[in-house]
Image: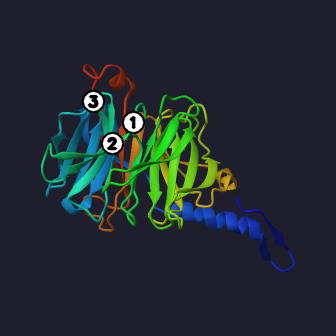
Amino acid sequence: MIFCSFDQPTKMWKVSTAAMCVTLVLLSLATEHCIGTPRITVVTQNLSWLENLVLVPSSDSMFVSELKFGRVWKIQMNSNRSYTRQLWVSSNFTRILGLTKNTAVPSMIYGVGSQGDENVVFSISTSRPNNFTIIAHTPKGRVGNGFGCHYASGKLYTASEGDFLPGTGSVYEIDPQTGKVTTISESLWAADGLWIDQDRHLLYVGQVTDSKMFIWNITSQNGAAVPKGSVETGLNSLTGLMDDFTLGFHGASIVAASWGESKIVEFTSFPSGDARQAKLGINVLVGNGTIHQPTSARWGESLDPRGAFPSTALFVTEGRAKDYLLPQEEKNSRLLRIDF
């Protein structure tokens, strides 16, 4: 809302500078992706809890992790714009959670999960099924969840929910070349979603329990991640249960999966760690019973509207509660494409 006064003698609007600044921020949020009426397409369905996904535009494919079965599926867009799926990683893992990529290495993606009691970080070939390599281990009881790659350094970052108790959530940096794991934080509460702003070199980590966001600078001179603060996102701290999230192309907004309220929301990003920005509120992009318990969201990466992953399309995974509790009997989760 713009607060202004109307000067009758001169017929001129007088708009306050502060109000104009708020307006510009809101316009930036609204135009980050041209948001209109969403059109939802079911890419694939009848799967167990889907935790995460990664897009590989060079091959018109994407990969999704099926948490409780420890599997990865490859989803391919065909020439007729239909989708087919292929079981890509089908053995050796107890759980698979986060997936990510390094755009400089299109021949592989990365994943985090567990093999029995061991928590592992691994690479997966994008051309050969069931071809993976363990590259690192995270500490016992600290399986990775949210997962990302800092393209400039090639370092990987993962968030762990820990024991879902305050002070047991963790964030780790992994060097995929050496397998070295460096602890960034061990004081969070159910650290879950993770995304990296590649332009500003900022690491975002969300707490699923209260939907709070933490930010680090990951390009300090000594190589250490420097905390920039924490902010409230505007989601309900009790019912929102913010899962994974993504940034828009220009870093002006964050689009997040609210698992607890079954909706996709958008709010301004916080590169300065300034909580005052959260007062601008959130915008519900998708809800009203059209999606169910979303776990992650990823914007397309192509400016070609006819491409497999146009920038106006959002790809969303669902993780249905019944699938988690009864994975053998219930397979209700879907991968969705939402065009705006």
Left of 225 or right of it: where is 93?
left
Q: Eyeballing the image, is 248 above or below 181? A: below
Q: Residues within 10 Å of mark 3 (few under 14, many from 20)?
A: some
| Kind of residue sitting beneath label 2 | Val
Residue for badge 1: 143
Q: Badges 1 and 3: C-beta atoms under 8 Å apart?
A: no
Q: Quadrant of the C terminus?
A: bottom left
The CA distance from mark 1 to mark 2 is 7 Å
Q: Earlier in the sequence, mark 2 or mark 3?
A: 3
Q: Secondary structure at mark 1?
A: loop
Residue for badge 3: 94
| Kind of residue sitting beneath label 3 | Thr
Point out residue 159 in the picture as x, y percentages from the top left corner: 45, 43
Q: Earlier in the sequence, mark 1 or mark 2?
A: 2
Q: Eyeballing the image, is 22 above or below 146? A: below
Q: Is residue 137 visible?
A: yes
Q: Badges 1 and 2: C-beta atoms under 8 Å apart?
A: yes
Q: Nearer the viewer, residue 225 or 268?
A: 225
Q: Quadrant of the N terminus?
A: bottom right
Q: Quadrant of residue 154?
A: bottom left
Point out residue 215 in the picture as x, y percentages from the top left corner: 56, 53
Residue for badge 2: 112
Q: Residue furthest right?
A: 9
Q: Number of labelled discs?
A: 3
